[in-house]
Structures are given as structure tokens and as C-alpha cells.
């Protein structure tokens, strides 16, 4: 077991002027009503595929709480309550384990997880630990943490942690050595660490070109953290032309009050998961529309060519050629928008579309969810 023995806090990134936070990046204005909205999913995607997860008496998945996919092997790791399910690329079950408990090789809860280089990293906020297992569930190691963290991201040689609630260090992001488990750097890209726990929010928007793109709740700016030296750079400042704006609620509300005030209101509270291709950047945003929240994907050019952005609404309609594009992304993986649908919903859509593949391959209404991979252009 590796114990953290020392913490290095080398700097807080300062911008010009009095603020501790870098200036906002270039503005990106999102028109949700007219010019940007498209009904052509082919503008966003070039193809899709799916993985039917093997279902048997030992591998029945309820809700998908967390999911990650190994970037090299494409192993799919799913967390449902305290259970961990591991599948290969074709959906065949590799292992299923539950190491919940208070023992030295067990996890007290699963706040987040990642699979990297054949190992599963489980972040337990309750016990302030990262437990590491192989793909069969065999215990490998434990990294003890000095504070509470709720989200995890892994880059080459490093584990990054985010605290979406105030912690004693005052720093929102921490970098841990992947081998030793020691904290090597702490970074605070924003004014202060005053977030509160919201399980629907992920501060890690994407990892690209050795940079982490990060956000916070009730803030429409995106900052990047250089994974080599921790330098913070303002990347974008998004403005979505919804009926209400965060600025309408003033500066006096606590985060809890702001959460309650903006619930079920036509206002976007933070940027969502992102992905980059050679020609565009994609961002998901949650927008309340009449009866509930719906995922929207915004595609925009950030190469300086000034190409108008496009917006696609998910869940309100069916798109030609992409009938299973119905749910929010669980993650982006290798240029894929990765989502899941219940087996019953998949079969209903397939029936309406005249698609027989799922029934012919053994899918029933009681099967595990189906994972869909929509390839971004």
C-alpha cells in the first residue's frame, strides 16, 4: 500500500490584475433557436455501431452509474451500485465483482472510476482513497488521499482528481503520480473552491493534446490545465441564448440556493462533456425545454475559419440514419459519442425501423442495456 508522504503546492496561477483566475477565453455564442439548429445528424456523425452486453444470471446491470473504456484494448468497465462489470469490445463478459466493504482491499463507495492500461482505478470519496484492481477484480494497490475528491481522470503518467465540494486544501484539482500515488501538483483554475456535490456534473470535459479541459458548476467558462507543468489557460467563454442567464440570478446566492433557483428553468449552468476531431470541437449541453432536460450537441470550429456552429437536439426527434441517437453521452471515446439505451427501448425502435439484428442476436426486453458508439466527423 502506498501512503502519501509529501504534498507539493508550487503555485496558484495568477492572471493580470487582481483576480486569481485567468481572464475568460474567446466568446462562443450558441444560438439554440434559429440559425444553428439542424435536423441533419449527418452533419455531426459519419456512422454508428453498437455493443450488446452479455446478460446472464451473474451479470445483470441496473442503472449505469459510471462507465469507462480502455483507450487501447476497448475493454468496457461499468459500475452499477457497488458492482463492477468488465466486458470486451464485443460485449462478452470478462468479469463481475463486488469489493464493497470496510476491509483494506475493499472500497467504501464508488464516486468515479477509470480503466487504464489494464487496471481499474476506483475513487472512493467516503474513505478518501483510490483502490486499484485488475480486470478480474484482484486487488493491486491503494492510494490514500489527503482530502475529499469526487471525480478522476487519467493521463499518461498521472491521475488527476477534482473536488466538486469544498475541501481543506482549497485547491480544486490535484495531480497524483500514477506509480507512487503521491500528490505532485495542485491547481486552482477558478476564483475559489466553493462547489457542492452534484452527481450529474463532471468537471473534466475532455483530455486532448496533453491538456485537460475543465469547468465548474454555475460558470460557462472552460479552462485548460497543461498536464506537464500545471499552467492554466482560459480557453472559451460560452454564451447560450436561453430565456434566462446565470447573471439574472445575481451574485449573492449560495451554490445550493443557485442550484434550487435554476432547477427546471431555461438556463444553462455549465458546459458539458466535449470532444475534438481534426475539423471541429463538440460540446454537450443540458437545456430545459418545456417538459424536461434534453441533451444538445454543439459543433463549432476553433481553427479560426469562422465556420458557423451547428446544434443538434437529442431525444426530441428521430434522425434519419441514426435511429438510436436518443440519450445523453456517457462519455466520448476515440471520437465516439458513447451512449446507452435500455433493451426494451432498443427493440421498440428497431421494430419501427424494420431492423431485425437485435432480436436475431438474442436481445430481449430483459437484456442488459445496449451501448451505442456514434462516430463524430
Image: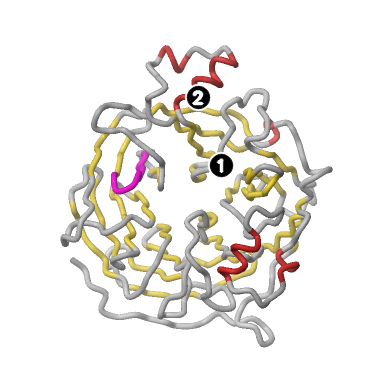
- Percent position of residue 74, x then y: 38, 38
> Quick one: label 2 or label 1, which is nearer the N terminus?
1
For this rendering, which residue is in front, 346 or 46? Answer: 346
Q: Is residue 339 left or right of residue 219?
A: left
In front: 332, or 241? Answer: 241
x, y percent for residue 22: 64, 76
- The residue lying at 48 percent from left, 74 percent from top is 187
Locate residue 149: give its quadrant.
bottom left
Say which residue label 2 marks.
346
When the figure is inspected, residue 45 is found, relative to residue 261, above or below; the finding is: above
Q: Nearer the viewer, residue 334 or 241?
A: 241
Tell me, yes or no, whether the highlighted magenta stretch contains residue 45. Answer: no
Q: Position of residue 219 (x, y in %)?
A: 64, 66
Q: Name which residue lies at 64% across and 23% down.
A: 321
Query: Does residue 276 lie above or below 149 as drawn?
Result: above
Q: How many marks?
A: 2
Secondary structure found at label 2: helix
- What colour scheme governs how the chains and residues are painted in the rendered image of this protein? secondary structure
Q: Is residue 11 above or below residue 149?
A: below
Residue at image coords 33%, 27%? 54
The reply to whether residue 42 is visible in this rendering is yes
Crowding at mark 2 (Cα within 10 Å: few <14, some 14-19, many 20+): many
User: What's drawn in magenta, residue-wise?
Assistant: 76-83
Q: Where's the C terminus, which quadrant? A: top right
Q: Looking at the rendered structure, which numbered label has been put on residue 328?
A: 1
Name the secondary structure under disc 1: loop
What is the spatial separation of the Cα atoms under label 2 and label 1, in whole angstroms? 15 Å
Residue 209 seen by the camera: no
Name the chief secondary structure element in magenta: strand
Residue 329 is situated, as x and y percent measured from the top left of the image, at 54, 42
Amino acid at each position: 500500500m502506498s501512503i502519501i508522504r509529501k504534498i507539493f503546492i508550487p503555485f496558484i496561477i495568477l492572471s493580470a490584475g487582481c483576480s486569481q483566475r485567468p481572464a475568460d477565453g474567446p466568446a462562443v455564442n450558441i444560438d439554440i433557436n434559429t440559425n444553428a439548429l439542424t435536423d441533419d445528424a449527418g452533419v455531426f456523425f459519419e456512422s454508428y455501431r453498437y455493443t450488446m452486453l452479455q446478460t446472464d444470471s451473474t451479470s445483470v446491470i441496473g442503472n449505469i452509474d459510471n462507465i469507462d473504456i480502455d483507450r487501447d484494448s476497448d475493454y468496457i468497465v461499468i459500475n452499477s451500485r457497488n458492482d463492477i462489470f468488465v466486458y470486451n469490445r464485443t460485449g462478452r463478459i470478462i468479469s463481475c465483482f463486488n469489493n464493497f466493504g470496510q476491509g483494506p482491499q475493499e472500497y467504501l463507495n464508488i464516486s468515479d472510476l477509470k480503466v487504464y492500461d489494464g487496471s481499474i482505478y476506483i475513487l472512493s470519496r467516503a474513505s478518501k482513497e483510490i483502490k486499484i484492481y485488475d480486470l478480474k477484480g484482484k486487488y493491486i494497490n491503494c492510494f490514500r488521499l489527503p482530502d475529499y475528491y469526487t471525480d478522476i481522470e487519467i493521463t499518461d503518467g498521472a491521475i488527476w482528481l477534482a473536488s466538486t465540494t469544498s475541501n481543506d486544501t482549497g485547491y480544486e484539482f490535484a495531480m497524483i503520480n500514477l506509480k507512487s500515488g503521491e500528490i505532485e501538483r495542485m491547481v486552482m483554475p477558478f476564483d475559489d473552491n466553493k462547489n457542492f456535490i452534484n452527481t450529474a456534473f463532471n468537471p473534466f470535459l475532455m483530455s486532448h493534446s496533453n491538456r485537460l479541459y475543465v469547468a465548474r458548476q454555475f460558470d460557462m467558462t472552460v479552462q485548460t490545465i497543461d498536464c506537464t507543468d500545471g499552467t492554466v489557460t482560459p480557453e472559451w467563454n460560452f454564451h447560450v441564448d436561453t430565456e434566462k442567464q446565470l447573471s439574472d440570478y445575481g451574485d449573492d446566492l449560495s451554490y445550493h440556493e443557485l442550484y434550487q433557483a435554476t432547477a427546471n428553468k431555461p438556463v444553462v449552468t455549465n458546459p458539458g462533456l466535449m470532444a475534438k476531431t481534426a475539423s471541429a470541437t463538440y460540446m454537450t449541453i443540458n437545456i430545459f425545454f418545456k417538459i424536461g432536460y434534453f441533451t444538445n450537441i454543439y459543433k463549432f470550429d476553433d481553427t479560426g475559419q469562422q465556420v458557423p456552429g451547428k446544434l443538434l437536439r437529442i431525444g426530441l426527434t428521430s434522425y434519419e440514419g441514426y435511429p438510436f441517437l436518443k440519450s445523453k453521452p456517457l462519455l466520448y471515446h476515440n471520437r465516439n459519442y458513447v451512449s446507452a439505451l435500455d433493451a426494451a427501448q432498443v427493440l421498440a425502435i428497431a421494430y419501427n425501423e424494420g431492423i431485425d439484428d437485435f432480436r436475431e442476436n438474442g436481445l430481449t426486453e430483459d437484456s442488459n442495456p445496449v451501448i451505442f458508439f456514434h462516430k463524430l466527423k
